[in-house]
Amino acid sequence: MLIGEAILFAGVVTLGVVLWGLSLGYVSIQMTQLSREYDRMISQHRTLLVIEAASLQSNTVWVSNPGMNDAIVISCTIYPKSQPSPGIRHNIPATRVAASPDRFEAISGCERYLGPPPYIVELWYMSAHLYNPADPARNIMTAQVARYEAG
Amino acid sequence: MVGAAIAIAIFFTTLVPLYLYMSTLYNLYSNELNYRRIRDIDRATESLEIVVGGTDNQIRLVLKNTSPLMIRVQRIWAMNVQEATPIGNDPCVQTPIDISPGWNTSVQVNQCLTNFTGRVQFIAVTERGRLFASKPVLVTGGRLASGLYPYILAVSIINMKMGSRYTILISPTGEADVQPRLITYRATARNENMSMSFGATAGTFMVYLLENDELIDQGRLIAPSTNPVEVTLPDYPIVVFILRGERQPR
């Protein structure tokens, strides 16, 4: 009788510990996923890019970042306003724009589409710490857009 | 009993912390949303008027803060409207300018437009990331076209002699300026009259009337009493040369 109770007790304790371990694992995974998701959402709200000027002669765009996170520009296109947006093109080397209103960056080599003026300058950017050069598909999911009318 | 104790332990060591963690994250996110909303409202509330003005040699921007917020202008770009490109490929003004609510300030921008001719639009970028633009203005040789010659000097010649060539020559004194400085006209009828207008700045000018490249002497003039005539703008913007008329053939 005593041995039977001991075995039952050991079984319950073992099962409890296993359940406890599984619960802790599940909670840890949930917390990590939640952290990533909130980090992504908060980063999007803290990132802001402004197109200050653009040159239709040299296809250069000057940008600044009055937001709170550094930004990475992943796409730059100049297209006629009468045409639809070409979307994210990954047509320039990823360019970091520091989060400081005092500084501005020149982004050259923007892709130009032919057509009548006026033109739309379109930049796709994302928070720098979310940027993963090896995973363009995921980058697109967190990218934001800035537009500017020129010409 | 032991099973119940373990269930309670699991509840307090996993689910409760998870709930607290989720609440904390949600609070952080709500704070961030509020902060972003406040920033967006501030950005939307910013209001800045840019007026381009100036005198003969200076072009100034008047920045009027018509919002209830302090505005810091980080940079001012001078854009070549025709080519849609920044003049000099750099900001015209890079020193931050603070403008209190309801106040205005002026900034000299000549340095960006040296010898530039064309239409210019100035764009101010604020610290919060807003862009405010002036109306495009015409600049000629680095000077504001509308401010170059704000006055008109009108010169009339009465009773010209048919076939003679008349030249009006205007010589500014000091810092005064006038365009054009010389106009020539050949009379095609007896006792012909004509009037011409010249763009001018304020100042003193000597107005000469020549007939066939020679200064008309006093004997040919009914009025004025001298040739050349000294006029000062903006007080005396009109000169009328009245010549003695030709007799009509019988």
Image (spheres, coloured by chain):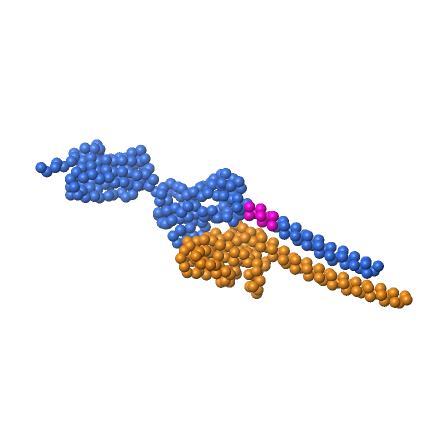
In front here: B165 or B66? B66
In front here: B208 or B22? B22
Q: Is residue A2 above or below residue A123?
A: below
The residue at the point 41 percent across, 60 percent down is A114
Q: In this rendering, does residue B165 appear at all?
A: no
Q: Main secondary structure of the magenta part?
A: helix
The residue at the point 49 percent across, 41 percent down is B65
Chain (orange): A
Q: Check the image and name the residue furthest to the left.
A: B250
The residue at the point 57 percent across, 57 percent down is A127
Residue A129 shown in magenta: no
Which stretch is magenta? B33-41
Residue B39 shown in magenta: yes
Q: Quadrant of residue A43?
A: bottom right
Chain (blue): B
In front here: A25 or B239? A25
Query: Residue B169: percent from the left, percent from the top?
Result: 24, 41
Query: Residue B115: percent from the left, percent from the top?
Result: 36, 49
In the image: residue B28, left or right of residue B108: right
Q: In this rendering, does residue A50 appear at all?
A: yes
The residue at the point 27 percent across, 40 percent down is B197
Which quadrant would the N terminus of chain A be assigned to in this image? bottom right
Query: Residue B127: percent from the left, percent from the top?
Result: 52, 47
Query: Residue B234: percent from the left, percent from the top?
Result: 32, 35
In the image: residue B4, left or right of residue B74: right
Q: Is residue A25 above or below residue B122?
A: below
In the image: residue B3, left or right of residue B164: right
Total numbered labels: 0
